[in-house]
Structure formats: structure tokens, C-alpha cells
Amino acid sequence: MSEITPELVEHLANLARIGLTPEEVQSLTGELGAIVDSVAKVSEVATPDVPATSHPIPLVNVFRPDVPGETVTTEQALAMAPEHDGSRFKVSAILGEEQ
Amino acid sequence: MSAAELMDYDKALELFEPVLGFEVHVELNTRTKMFSPAPNPANEEFHAAEPNTLIAPVDLGLPGSLPTVNETAVRYSISLGLALGCQIAESSRFARKNYFYPDLAKNYQISQYDEPIAHDGQVEIELEDGTLFQIPIERAHMEEDAGKLTHVGGSTGRIQGAEYSLVDYNRAGVPLVEIVTRPIFGAEHLAPQVGKAYVSTIRDIVRGLGISEARMERGNLRCDANVSLRPRGQEKLGTRTETKNVNSFRSVERAVRYEIQRQAAILAAGGTIIQETRHWHEDTGVTSPGRPKSDADDYRYFPEPDLLPVVPSPALIEELRAALPEAPAVRRRRLKEQWGFTDLEFQDVLNSGLLVEVEETARFGAAPAQARKWWTGEIARIANAQEVEASSLVSPQHVSELIALVENGELTDRLARQVLEGVIAGEGSPSDVVKSRGLAVVSDDGALIAAIDEALASQPDVLQKIRDGKVQAAGAVIGAVMKAMKGQADAARVRELVLERASQV
Amino acid sequence: MSTELITMSAAQLAEKLAAREISSVEATQAHLNRIADVDGDIHAFLHVSEAALSTAASVDAARGGGAQLGPLAGVPVAIKDVLCTFDMPSTSGSKILEGYIPPYDATVVRKLREANLVPLGKTNMDEFAMGSSTEHSAYGPTKNPWDLERIPGGSGGGSAAAVSAFEAPLALGSDTGGSIRQPAAVTGSVGMKPTYGGVSRYGAIALASSLDQVGPVARSVLDAALLHDVIGGYDPHDATSLTDTWPSFAEAARAGRNGESLKGLRVGVVAELNGEGFQAGVRQRFDEAVALLAKAGAEIVEVAAPSFEYAISAYYLILPAEASSNLAKFDSVRFGLRVTPEGGGTVEEVMAATREAGFGPEVKRRIILGTYALSAGYYDAYYGSAQKVRTLIQRDFSAAFEKADVLVSPAAPTTAFRFGEKLDDPLAMYLNDITTIPANLAGVPGMGLPIGLAPEDGLPVGIQLMAPAREDARLYTVGAGLETLLEEQWGGSLLAQAPALGVER
């Protein structure tokens, strides 16, 4: 049986910054439980001797020369912003402390 | 905020052993950002840009944008790793650190996690009394900086009580190297000084490498200080706090001292230290609690799929190692000898954290003794009064120019101090200030002779004394002439001319 | 003439344009008319370009002026809405990006424009490419031109429906776990997922960075190859882009048409991808296609890929994990939707409310699943294990390609299903990708092309061909060979058998 509880779903939604209604928490708990039970089978074959693959085609040392290139203008940057003051993006008050 | 209860420092050290740790972020001065080709505001060339003008799609986290790695930033990071005495990883990779914050455009920071570019090093620092101390380095890794928030509304400009915030992403993506120490034992009562000397040494190293502007007041170098205490005789480490925003050498010293005293008071009263982030307040000299560490700090690191591993070749590492400047300790010994300073004079420079300034000023042509005199004297005095770093006031080039003006006789020491004030006030280079304030020494002999003749004529008794060989009597005439010239004359030259005229008139 | 203009292949259209038998304006107008006629039923397009005719006119003018133009100059093309276009909204099928116009073009779009193709508009898709039916589009589903009660596949159902309903001769798709190949299978069209890194991802709104690949959607193998030639190749904006020099895929397709290339070709049938749960008519047509290949001289070998059994599980850990991070940028700060809770709220609350309102249920499900998979304490069991399965799958491919030049499987386990049939059962929906996912996990190229109609429902069945990484050309050669044999049997293309749509002009 899965370890997905409504409390865990709420915690994950908070980490992912997604508001959920109580109904959504309920349905996601069931759905995620079923999915997790199903996908957990990866650990059956993932033995310690098998290396992990993070990139399908192995490449290394892909660099960009340190030369200024394409940028966007302030106007372009702000054009799609929900709110701005003419040069900066505007957001409502931030809870808590500086990061 | 209310000040915490503090224990007497010596008492605290009697009861507890302080254990330190530092995380120093160095902004690299590459021309472009870590992961985008936008100009880098941590490079002097782009420092004063308007908000949101140094941005590429990836710096704004625009949909579809992709990061690319700045090759120069990688080279700089490897050089820094080598200068810190680190091993350079055979293979190193980037990872995403996931958390939401409005200054973090993608809501993840590209950093390094399990495979940093450099690890296991050691840095030697020199304390005020000349003793050497080893700082163990755990790792140095590459990452990107976040944007800048401005909090508007409320009374303080601080985050609490603000009505809204404004975000400028110019700084987003600035290349950073984060240097993390291992726990530092054995600093004992010198712990605050160890902190200051360590950060100052890091600054010397990165400036020596030329990879960062390294100006703390601009945030090119930022320090988080970890402090924990353990009762004497106890092996287990105490709970530590992480003090952020400690952004001058003096603050590092003060913040470490403050935390030792604060924690000691709590522990002695039977309390417990909360593992938390604390903020240093430069103005009040205290730390205040921030977020406690919690489950919310689940950063969900995973290998950055948009970027590939960095596998520096042994040839590259050797090339960069060969190009390293000498180690700070070696360099200090060399400079002391080269400059011919006494132990005391040299310690004076070191303890003021002005070695680089003096060195650079000398490189621009000034006599080292003069450079030392100005930096540790007048400039340090003003910096102290203004509570800023001396290095932030004036550039070595300008100091060198100032010294040259004095040497050439164009300025007296007194005038030079006025010129310095002008330079610090942002009126331009020393020669600009001389011009705009009209401060040059009067070197027109004609004007001086006229004034001397007038003074001699009005003081016939003095003239007679000089003619009689009582040269010291000339002082009165010199004083009168200097007064007439409003001090803008070279007293030595005036004296010469007075003696000359006295024999002729 | 109008009907002919929309039913001919892109290759034929290109020839007539080059010969100036027709103009790009005529060809473009014919397709715009078709869109006006049938897209009310099909809903393949989210946006139809207002600039298409003027773009076409400028291509005609350039050709009239004697300019040397590329092989597809003047040919209209539809663009999946996952790709950024500076002159059209780019929503990725999500409400959170409604009306969003990026300040830049995706590299593949830029290449289309540089090659003088004519963008017709943006095609529908499952929100952020999460789905196999387009039922997860925030803008309503696309209908399958073969049966308007059925799904066109997903996520690229819009592009597949656009070409199979003759609304566009060519389209761009993106394929993370089958989003090009599965829609091709269920609409009787051709789709190619190139080798990972063969086509730039820059400007493709990321779903899962290590799996995503942009590719061509068309009605014939040659047409797909012609489009692949335009969009493929190295892009310095994408660090995962391959620097390989690629052969002409169009030439590879033309070379395959005579059937010679099938002689002695070793064709591996993947046992694990043709088993339980596959529709009878799908298996029948697949077996017939394999028999046809054998008859043409191919050597059929059975290959085992035991780890493929774990592919879906690995995929549904890796994809949500990467997606949870990639989709964090949709936070209401710099672009896209902003929803403020009643009475205002902190930025955290605004972000949560925006993402609650702006994301559909499947996106939320996968983000939360991915957040879980990356969480401290679960990483090793889930994400870490999935990355290991990836290694095992690559090993299976390597072993299989020792025995076979190409691998084959049905492109999808069933023909097009009815709307709503699997909507409430995410796991059943995920199983649609069982045949296509291994290629994404390993980065190898895969092609889907039609092999007939299932006897039981008269709906298209597709085959999938897979080749080793970087051997994309082999798929065009083999695909064109098989296509030629099939069309000889059918007496024309499979799509010629599709029911008529809309009002004939």
C-alpha cells in the first residue's frame, strides 16, 4: 500500500506552490498512490552496480565563449509582465525573510 | 529589535570553545554571465547598468530558454580552486536547487551539489600578531546569483512591512563561486580575527587572480558566518547558527564575536541554540533571527539536464596551475622585503586589510612608503569615520596620482588632503579636483617674489636679522607669504626665495 | 486546383513552386481556406497566422527576383504551440500562458523562416505536452480527422490532425515520450523523433529536458525528411545539441524508395513491444508489415529487451521530476497569468493561486508526482533508480542493435480511442506510450508511419522504426522503402482513404 497521505500531498503542493482544494487533495492522494505503487518497480532492477544515466547522449565540456551576445530589452522583458513600474517587475509583499 | 543578552567575551571563551565555518560567495568578473551571454554587472564595465538591461531570455526564465556554460567562468573557478589548494574534480556537474523566490527567475538555481568543481583544500591566513593559521576548505562550487529585490512601502525598506517589491534581474545569472570551509577548530579567543583574516585572504586571492572585482560593498564578495559553541571538554559539536549578510571585514569580526557572546549567554542560562539563519545588522551591530531550518528546505537537487558535465583535462589544470600568482603568504614575505618596511609598518598595512591597495598604488608608480602613509593614515581615518572600507573610497590609481602631485611639488600635504576629499566626494581624478577647486600650489615665482618683497618691506627689522645671518628669523616672513598665498604655495620654495630676496632687496 | 494544392505532398508542392507553376500565395491561400472549412470541426489550430499570406507574397517576390531559395521555400507549415514564435502566441496549450508572445523565435522556427517556409499558425496540444490525446489542452481537444468522436493522439494531436486533415502539408512536433509518433500512428501520418540533440530544443517550452526532442510531422517519409533537413543541426544555444554533420535526410528517403535498401536489412522485432494488451488489428497489420519487409529481402530477427518492462515506470518518474522543475518558472512574476486571491495576498499566495488556476489537473498531478520523486529521502528510490533503468534500457538497445540494423514495433498499442475513454484513469492513459518511451529514454531516433487500417474499426495503424543514435538517415531510407511497398498495395496513400471533411469548395 502506498505511503501517499493527504498530508503529504498538501506538503508537496506547498513545495510546488500549487493551491489545492480539499477535493483535489483527496483525489490526488488516491491517484498518486496508484501511480507511485506502479512506478516503484524501478527499484527492482536499480542495483548498486548500475550507473545512473542523466543525459541520453553522453557529451562533456560544452562551453560558450565569454563574449556578450543576444539580450532582450527592458521593454521586451516587461511587455508580458502582469505588473511592472516601467523598469522593474512588481510583485506583492513577500512573506518572511530575505533568502 | 531588542538586543539579546550577551556574555562577557572572556568569560564565554572560558566556558566554551567556538567552532567556526564560512561560506564565501565570490562574484566572478567575466564579461558575460554564468549561463547566458548577457553582460555581467559584476564586471566593472557593466557595473552601473539600469535595472533589467543586462538580461537574456534565460536570466528571465523565459519559456523555451536554455542555459549555456561560460567557459571563462569555468577556467576562473578552476584557478580559484587551485589557489585554495583544492583538488580539481575529474568530472564535475551542475545541479538544480529548487525553491520558489521572486528574485529567482526559473525558481531553481543552477548550482553544483554532489560533484563540485573543486574540493579538499587549505588556505593559510596570517593573524594580526603574524601567526599563521590553516583554514580547511571543504569545497568550491560554481553557481549563479539571483536578481535583486527592492522592498517598497513600510518604514524601513526592509522586507517586513513592505507593501510590494520590485525585481531587477540584472544580477540574475552572475557567475558565483561558493567557497565552503570545513569546521574550523582552535581559533579560540582569536575567532573573530580568524574570520576577518580569512575573508580578507580570500579577497586577496581572488584579486590576485584577477577573477573578481572583490568589492565587498558592492556584494562582489559575500560572507555567511557559521558559529557554534561547545562546552569545554565536550566532543560533540554544538548547534550552529548561520549569520548572513556579513559584508565587510570588520563585520565578520564583529558578527563572530557577537554570536559567541550571544550563544554563550543562552547556553550558560540552560537554553538551547536554534539551528537557524540569522541576519547581521551593520548599523546596530547585532544579529537577528531569520528562518529556522525546516522541512521547507527540501531543495530537491537533481542533475541539471540542460547542461553537461565539466571534465577539465589534466593539461588545462596544469596550464592554470602554472599561471597562478604566488600564494598570499609567500607574496607577503616578498612585498615586505621589496618595500623595506619594518615589521610594525608591514603589520599595520596587513591589519588594515590594505595590502592590495598599497601594492596597486605602488604599481602605479608611487613610493611604497608614501602609499602606506596615505592608505593607513588619511584614507583609513576617513573610512573609519564613515564606517566604510577604505578600498571603497578611492582607487589605487588616484592615490598614486595624488602622491605624484605632492612629489612634483604641485601640492602640499595639506592641499593633497583637500584634493583627496574631492576625489572621495566623486569630483573626479586628483588632477580634476586640483583644477576644479583651484588648489594647485602657486609655483609662479613672480607672484611669490611680489608677496615676499611686500612682506620684507613691511618688516624691516626681520629683513635686517636675515641679512645679519639669523636665518631662522625668515619664519615670520614665510608665514606672512603663505598666508597671503592662502596656503597654496610650497613653503620650501618660499623659504628659498625669501633668503634670496633678502640678500638682494 | 485548390483540392490538389492541399492534397499533394510537400515535395510535389515544392517542385511546382520552384518551377513557378504555382505561387506560394496560392498554396498558402488554399491551406487557409481548408483551415476555414474544416478546423471548426477538427480544432487543430490554436492560432492562425495573419502574416501567412504576406510572408508567402514575399517568398514569391524573392523567387520572382531570381533568388536561390531552399527546397521547401514557399511551402506552408504548421507549428506546434510548444515552440516559441515572436509573432504569434505561444501557450503550450496552457491557460497560464494565454496570449503570451515570446520576444524570440525557437531555433527551429528561425530555421523555418530562414528557409522561407510559410508559418500557417500554431497547433493544439495537451497542456505542456502532458498527454496522449489532446484532451488535456486548456483550449479544448483536437478531433481525429478519421473519426471526430476520437482522439488524434497526443500531445501533438494538433500537428498530426493538421497534416492528416490537409490543413497543412507539414508541421513541427515535439516528442518527449511519443508525442510525435503516437499521433502519427492514430491519424495515418508520418512523424519522426530525431536522435536526442539532433534538433535544437532552444525555444521549445521544456517538458522534460533530457527527453524532449523537436521533429517533423508530415504525410510522407520524404516530406518529413525534407523538413528534418531544414530544422536539424547544431545550435550553440542548446548545450545538448550535437555538433555532428548530418547527411541529407531527403536524399536518404529518396534512396530508400526503390526498395533495394531493404535487401539484407536486419529488422529486429522487439518481443516486449508487441504483446499483451495490444489491439488485435494493430498486431495483425504490424505482422503483415513485417512480412512485407521479409518479402522484400529483409532478414527478420527477434530481439529481447528485458528492461523495456521498466521503461514506463522510469519515464513517469523522470518526466514529472524534470517537469516539476521546468514548470516552476510559471509563477506570475515576469509573464503569463496572475491570479491574486480575494483581498490580496503575499507573493507566495499569489503564486499558489496562479498555479492553481492556471494549470490543468494532469499538469498538477505530474508536478506533484515529480516533486515527490525528487524529495529528500525519496530521491534514491525513485529518481535515482529511474536513471539507472535508463542505463539498462540503453544497454538493451546496444545489444539489440548488435543483431539488427533497425528495430520495429507497433507505434501505439491501439488505434485512436474515444474521447473520455481514458481520461479518468491516468495509468491507462500512460500505457499509450509503452512503445515509444524507450527511444526517448535512450535518445535514439524513432519514426512512426502508417501501415494500414485495423480491420475491426477501420482506423489507422502505425509502425515504429528505431535506429541507433545518430542513424536518423537509416530510418528515412527504410521508412521510405516500406512506404513505397505499402502504397503499391494500397494504390495510393493511406490518407486518401480518409473520410471527407467539411464543405468541398
Image: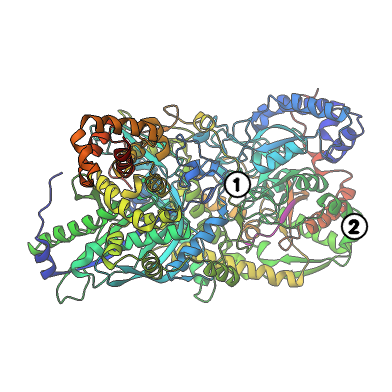
Amino acid of disc 1: Ser
Which of marks 1 and 2 precedes in the sequence?
1
Residue C49 relative to residue C386: left or right: right
Residue in the picture at 30% in, 28% down: C343
Instruction: Report the side of B504 relative to B38 (left or right).
Output: left
Find the magenta span and give its range: C442-448
Task: Identify the residue position indicated by label 1 in the image.
Answer: C132
- Labels 2, 1: front one: 2
Considering depth in this image, is C41 or A10 the residue closer to the camera?
Answer: A10
Determine the residue positioned at 45% across, 56% down.
B363
Secondary structure of residue under mark 2? loop
Q: Compare residues B437 and C358 and report the one nearer the observer.
A: B437
Residue at 75 percent across and 24 percent down: it is C54
Residue B317 percent across, percent down from the top left: 55, 69
Residue C77: name its quadrant: top right
Task: Name the residue furthest left.
Answer: B269
Q: Residue at x 54, y 48 (%)?
A: B31
Query: What kind of residue is marked 2?
Result: Gly
Check disc 1: other Cα within 10 Å, few if <14, some if 14-19, many if 20+. Answer: many
The spot of residue B446 in percent (x, y) is 39, 32
Q: In the depicted view, which residue is nearer to us: C441 or C178?
A: C441
Q: Position of residue C222 (x, y in %)?
A: 83, 47
Quadrant showing the N terminus of chain C: top right
Which of the chains bears the disc numbered 2?
A: C
